[in-house]
Amino acid sequence: MSKEAKLVVEPRTELGSAACRRLRERGLVPGNVYGHNAPPASIVVLSDALRPILKSGAHVIDLELSGKLDKAIIREIQWDVYGKEIRHVDLLRVDPNERVTITVPIELKGTAPGVVAGGMLEQPMHQLSIDCLAYQIPDSIQVRITALDLGQAIHVKDLELPEGSRAHAQPDAIVVHVVKLLERDLAAAEAGPAEPEVIGKKPDAEVEEKKDDKKKK
């Protein structure tokens, strides 16, 4: 079940890229609130108030704007190129009993026996798009791999989702599996890298031929 938190935001009157840059310099994050049969609103929030909520993994929040409380989800976060500073936030108003579509990270738990036996763990899918009730948004989808042997896989259809949730990926899509290392790959690894060819090196036959020519002279 998702964690919940309260976030107080203020109406944003300064619009445009230059105004947003000035807000960020003051430790504020520009953003938008929309959805739930209400007009969209431009907002601003303290970066120091938003960061703990993101760190906690909360999805559903109690949003206070101009004294009015709404349930909302964090729809999108934009970071700077270094992933350190929050540049923009989009919030979506929701009814707690309304279905929402959201992308949730996949978290592996345990150690696969197939890896201990010499296989290699591969995880083609690191996140999953699902739709569920707003109050049932999971912080992550936990996948236990403690029974995963060589050649076995866990598919989307095998995942444990909140009751009433639905995954958007194909049921047979592989989330994680343990693959066998091919014998030829192991042999190549044991043999080590091949000796590099020296550019300009003369073949032995050609060298011998040149020696014979000098003797005749």
Image: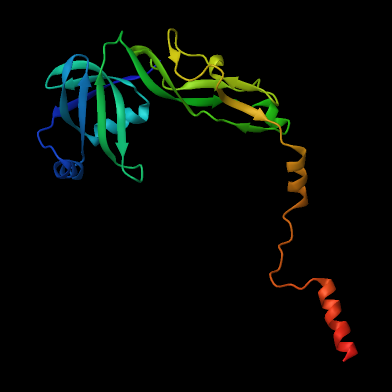
Which residue appears at 83% of the width and 81% of the height?
A: 210
Name the one closer to the observer, 5 or 188.
188
The image quarter containing residue 181 is top right
Percent of width and height locating residue 186: 75, 42
For this rendering, which residue is in front, 37 or 161? 37
Expressed as whole percent of the image width and height from the top left, the position of residue 183 reads: 77, 38
Q: Which residue is pictured at 37% across the width and 26% down the height?
A: 57
Q: Is residue 111 visible?
A: no
- Horizontally, residue 120 falls left or right of residue 48, namely right
User: Camera-side residue: 161 or 56?
Assistant: 161
Does 186 appear above or below 49?
Answer: below
Residue found at the very far bottom of the displayed protein: 217
State the scheme by which the image is colored. Answer: rainbow
Q: Position of residue 185 (x, y in %)?
A: 73, 42
On screen, residue 21 versus residue 73, left or right, reads left
Coordinates of residue 5 in the picture (x, y in percent)? 29, 21
Q: Is residue 127 left or right of residue 110?
A: left
Q: Quadrant of the N terminus?
A: top left
* Residue sitting farthest toward the left: 13
The quarter of the picture where residue 213 lies is bottom right
Q: Is residue 187 above or below residue 11?
A: below
One can see residue 172 in this view: yes
In the rendered view of the protein, which quadrant contains the C terminus? bottom right
